[in-house]
Image (tube, helix red, strand yellow):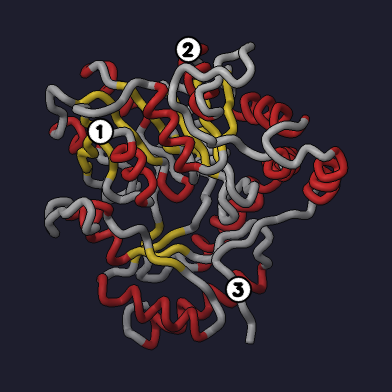
Amino acid sequence: MLHIPLYQPDLSGNERAYLLEAFDSGWISSKGRFVAAFESAFAVQVGVAHAISVCNGTAALHLALLALGIGVGDEVLVPTLTYVATVNAIRHVGATPVFVDADAQTWQIDVADARRRISPRTRAALAVHLYGGSCDLHALRSLCRDHDLRLIEDCAEAIGNRFDGEHVGRGADAATFSFFGNKTLSTGEGGMVVCMDDTVADRVRRLRGQGLVPGHEYWHDIAGYNYRMTNLCAAIGLAQLERIATTLASKRRLDARYRSALAGSALRFQCHHDDDQPSHWMTSVLTPEPGQRDPLRAALAAAGIETRPLFSPVHLMPMYDGRRGAFPVAEDLSGRGLNLPSWPDLSESQVAHVTATILDHLEQQGCG
């Protein structure tokens, strides 16, 4: 049976050659030429002064919060409609996540709702650029200026996003990226912290490497972490970054094909801010009613097509013990939304199979 996965990485560039070079050099852990080369190239891509590689996106979030001095007694505004790692990182530094609802059109953090939830203990906003779209950075930056808050951008799903002409993350106090296997740029596992501030960058680097004092072998004056990226992962990342423009162009064409083929259907696509140039990490749609989402996913699975539901709102998870109904937009979106196969090399015939299966199912259910 035809099988169309939700995502798979494109490893058709210099990935194999760079991996073999790293392997043959003997530098397979956190030293070697590819770590510095990847960091330097990534900083240029985003337009920042500093890019510090780490072992995964969760570690990047953890270090960004620590480097900005967020800790016990602090509150951090964070969308509830996100992957759980975003919120867990806040808990890991001892701060309190203050959940914020989603915007019904863009699915990003609702800045007006965030403003209502600010208290004297609020120290930061951790905004997530969800599914390859961008948050309203004009409104977020204004909010943070008005209330003297740190702005952290979780760009795990947003490599290539530009907002008002500028790469997301560039204007934050710190921003983080993930390079998990299903991301637009993948190293298998990996992440990056980016920033403009020298002091923040220095803290991240030292925390990443067990708190080592620069220039003093085996002397540490803070309790750090082993969050370093390996030379092997960085080799893959550098190769991926070399053709990121081509990858992003393919993903934008793919999203446009989906939108054209399903334009007359009852499904609704994620919308984007006027100033947003999205990367479309995951092309995602909503069914008209919550009860229609899972039958559609089942029909697609029966046709060999893998999909994924939107994230479950984190406030509903047992460790955060929220009450249902507190964030109605996020709960509604989560119950109706699904991600479609979104890897950049998806063929026109595969897209046609996906969209035809969707349209046939919707017609059979009387909601085409």
* Residue 284: x %, y % from top left: 44, 59
Task: Give the residue type at disc 2.
Answer: Thr
Q: Could you tell me residue 131's position as x and y percent?
A: 45, 50
Residue 190 position by quadrant: top right
The residue sitting at 24% across, 58% down in the picture is: 317
Neighbourhood count class around disc 3 (C-alpha, 10 Å): few under 14, some 14–19, many 20 upward: many
Q: Going by the image, does 100 lie left or right of 292?
A: left
Up the image or down, 241 lies above or below 166; here it is below
Residue matched to label 2: 199
Q: Which mark is residue 95?
A: 1
Check disc 3 and report the residue beneath it: 4
Tell me if residue 189 comes above or below residue 366 in the rendering. Answer: above
User: Circle 2 — which element?
Assistant: helix
Callout 1 crowding tier (Cα within 10 Å): few <14, some 14–19, many ≥20 = many
Q: Determine if residue 163 is in view.
A: no
Q: Which one is in front, 230 or 50?
A: 230
Q: On screen, 136 above or below 321?
A: above
Residue at 48% across / 79% down in the picture? Answer: 300
